[in-house]
Image (cartoon, helix red, strand yellow):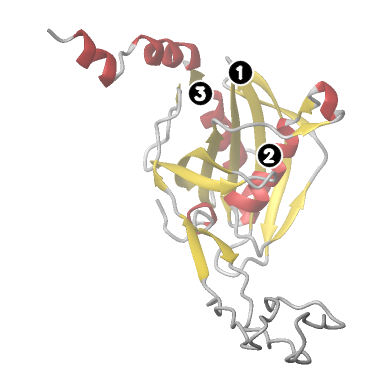
Amino acid sequence: MQARRGFILALIMMVLISACSSGESEPSPTPEPTLTPVPTSTSTNTPAPTNTGEPTALPTATATLVSIELSPSEGQPPPFTIDLPEGWSSAYYALPIEEIDGNIRVIQIAGYNGPVTEGAGYVIVIWGFSNISVGNPLTGGTQSLWLDGLRFWRLQVVEPDCNVGTDLQREFTVGGLPAVGTFVSAVDCPDTPDTAGWFAGLNNEGANFIFYAFTEPSSALQNETGAPAELQNILDSVQFFVADRMTQVALTPSPEAEATEAP
């Protein structure tokens, strides 16, 4: 895989969590020498003084910066077959991301790239993720693969600082199955060339998939009989076996079960 591609560059994310710090507070002035301490006019974090008038100092909290690196790891092969042209390569990643609800979840990414007419072609597949729900939250809302495709294009596939363009929702096909998506682009990226293409999302046997097909440079997409047709041929070759994968996982005993059954 070409290391400079946007989807590999975008696989490193940083979440910074700052711990609050509080400085040492000045003690309240020593009250008049009476048995009852005189309250101050303003509240402070200093403990109430004793009858001896000795102040009690608060410990100083040291500010710390905790850095959590959301780094990619080796991912799982996706539950589908795909026919790649000669000269194409593939790689699989498991990427932790911070979702819109603040939770950290892992998404699976399969990346394919190789030569196409007048440039380089990419097919990036994000799968095994939870949908964004729109509509009434009391009824569960409506799952939107189109919105998922838009957010992953902006946040995971291309560089965050690119100038991203999208189109209206459209219909596409993957493996002969209907899929929802739109045309997308990314220009003025800091480290990668301008790119353009489309994405197509679908649900198969309860699993979500979004296929991104794009080229660099973006001009390679203008010849409809060239790169676009070659990328669509790759998408047409996809054959899902999600149900078989789920059956295989269900029938495979866990190590604990095997240890229990051993004599």
At label 2, which amino acid type do we have? Gly
Compared with 258, 183 (above or below) is below
Q: Position of 14 compared to 169: left or right?
A: left
From this viewpoint, is residue 124 visible? Answer: yes
Q: Position of 253 compared to 185: left or right?
A: left
Q: Nearer the viewer, residue 66 or 191?
A: 66
Distance CA(mark 3)–CA(mark 2): 19 Å
From this viewpoint, is residue 226 visible? Answer: no
- Mark 3 touches mark 2? (CB < 8 Å): no
Q: x, y percentage for residue 83?
A: 43, 28
Q: Secondary structure at mark 3?
A: loop
Distance CA(mark 2)–CA(mark 1): 19 Å
Residue drawn at 67 percent across, 67 percent down: 188
Residue to which mark 2 is pinned:
149
**Comparing marks 3 and 2, which lies closer to the viewer?**
2
Q: Nearer the viewer, residue 198 or 160?
A: 160
Residue to which mark 3 is pinned:
238
Q: x, y percentage for residue 147?
A: 75, 38
Residue drawn at 40 percent across, 33 percent down: 76
Q: Between disc 3 and disc 2, whose residue precedes?
A: 2
Distance CA(mark 1)–CA(mark 3): 8 Å
Report the residue that reaches farthest toward the front: 35
Compared with 34, 205 (above or below) is above
**Comparing marks 2 and 1, which lies closer to the viewer?**
2
Residue to which mark 1 is pinned:
176
Label 1 crowding class (10 Å Cα cut-off): few <14, some 14-19, many 20+? few
Residue 171 is drawn in which quadrant?
A: top right
